[in-house]
Image (cartoon, rainbow, N blue to C red):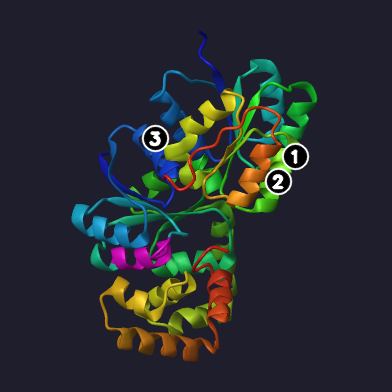
Amino acid sequence: MTVPKVLIVDDHAFIRRGVQGILQAHPEWQLCGEADNGKDAVRMARELNPEAIVMDVSMPGLNGVEATRAIRKTNANVKILLLTLHESSELVRTAFQAGINGYLLKTDAEQELVQALNVVIAQGTYVSPRIDPAVAKELISRGSRPAAVSDAGTN
Amino acid sequence: MNLRILVADDHDIIRRGLKQLLTAHAGWNVCAEAKTGREAVSLAEEHKPDVVVMDVSMPDLNGLEAARRIRKALPKTEIVILTLHFSDQLVHDIVEAGARAYIMKSDADRDLVAAVEAISNRRSFFTPRAAEMLLNGFRKQSTPNAAPTEYRSRLTSREREITQLLAEGKSSKEVAVALNISVKTAETHRANIMRKLELHSVSELVRYAVKNQIIEA
């Protein structure tokens, strides 16, 4: 079985380093590239053809939600996991409408990143346990594929 | 040069990333990690690091108050402050707190190592926008932004600490437990804060704390 490739997109170097550090401890995932803005993310998603993208929201130029929309125009398969500081239900909805498969808060990334990647790669929907459970439930039940989510409140 | 560094940020993944960026430099070691300002002060006292790399927005006690206390207890320890957003007022607060380096999180890749190198040689390092602002302030020979400066001079360190706890939603009783003081003392501090800042409700206090970056919105 081939190891799934992950592209990390964040304008903050220490977040990219942090994700790299977590993935290094999990050889079942392979970091294939890094981008520090949305525009490069779109290009690298096309060139590297990763199985998953860990994407920040607030970035200069093209933000993570806009980059997701652009990637979805040509690539329906790549799993996009949004990694953000924002807990707003509105952003959660907008991001899922744009085509993300998972929504992970930076607060929980250290503990939940690999689990979230496992959920989205298995065709599931991941919503951070801190997000309003009603919103999470609505998004997961709306998904056309079998849904999965981390157990709320376990971290 | 060998350096012992304390890293303080409430996000685990950010501490992990900062640690990776710092330890990639030969001779630099992260001797302790803190999740809150209060933890940073106590770990700094315990480990006596050469440098503290610290976020401003942390629960319990923010980075500015923590920096003030660390500088007071350990004058040889230099502090790098990291922030997500730039604000003129913050530059003044950082300087006043005794930190000699201020960088933006977005520039950490470029500036973090340079900032730590500079302060370990007893030099300052400010993100270019802050450096320009400080220079302009110096040229004008004036004290910018009177209002928040007034806040600083009017409140004691203890009152600033309690302002943050109240703005985070803690009751006087919870403040008393957190700081190991009596409920009556906590209530007196609370009344003094409200009087000094001319505030009349907790929601006004929260707005005030957000505006002055004591807590995040």
Circle 3 or circle 2, nearest the eye: 2
> What span is colored magenta in the figure?
B59-71
Q: Is residue A130 magenta?
A: no
Crowd tier of the residue under label 3, counting other residues whose Cα lies within 10 Å: few below 14, some 14–19, many 20 or above? some
Crowd tier of the residue under label 2, counting other residues whose Cα lies within 10 Å: few below 14, some 14–19, many 20 or above? some
Element type where label 3 sits in the image: helix
Name the amino acid, label 1.
Gln
Residue matched to label 3: B20
The part of the image, by quadrant, that contains residue B174 is bottom left
Q: Is residue A40 left or right of residue B96?
A: right
Disc 1 with disc 3 on a shared chain: no
- Report in which chain the residue with disc 2 lies: A
Question: Looking at the image, can residue B20 be seen?
Answer: yes
* Mark pair 3, 2: CA separation: 34 Å
Q: Where is residue A104 drawn, in percent x and y?
A: 55, 41
Identify whether A62 is placed above or below B45. Answer: above
Residue at position x 65%, y 49% from top?
Answer: A135
Residue matched to label 1: A97
Q: Where is residue B44 drawn, in percent x and y?
A: 26, 56
Tell whether label 2 touches label 1 (CB within 8 Å). yes
Element type where label 2 sits in the image: helix
Disc 1 with disc 2 on a shared chain: yes
Q: Which mark is residue A93?
A: 2
Name the amino acid, label 3.
Gln
Please tell me whether the stretch drawn in magenta is mainly helix, strand or loop: helix
Name the amino acid, label 2.
Arg
* Mark pair 1, 3: CA separation: 35 Å
Identify which residue, A103 or B69, lies in the foreground. A103
Element type where label 1 sits in the image: helix
- Report in which chain the residue with disc 1 lies: A
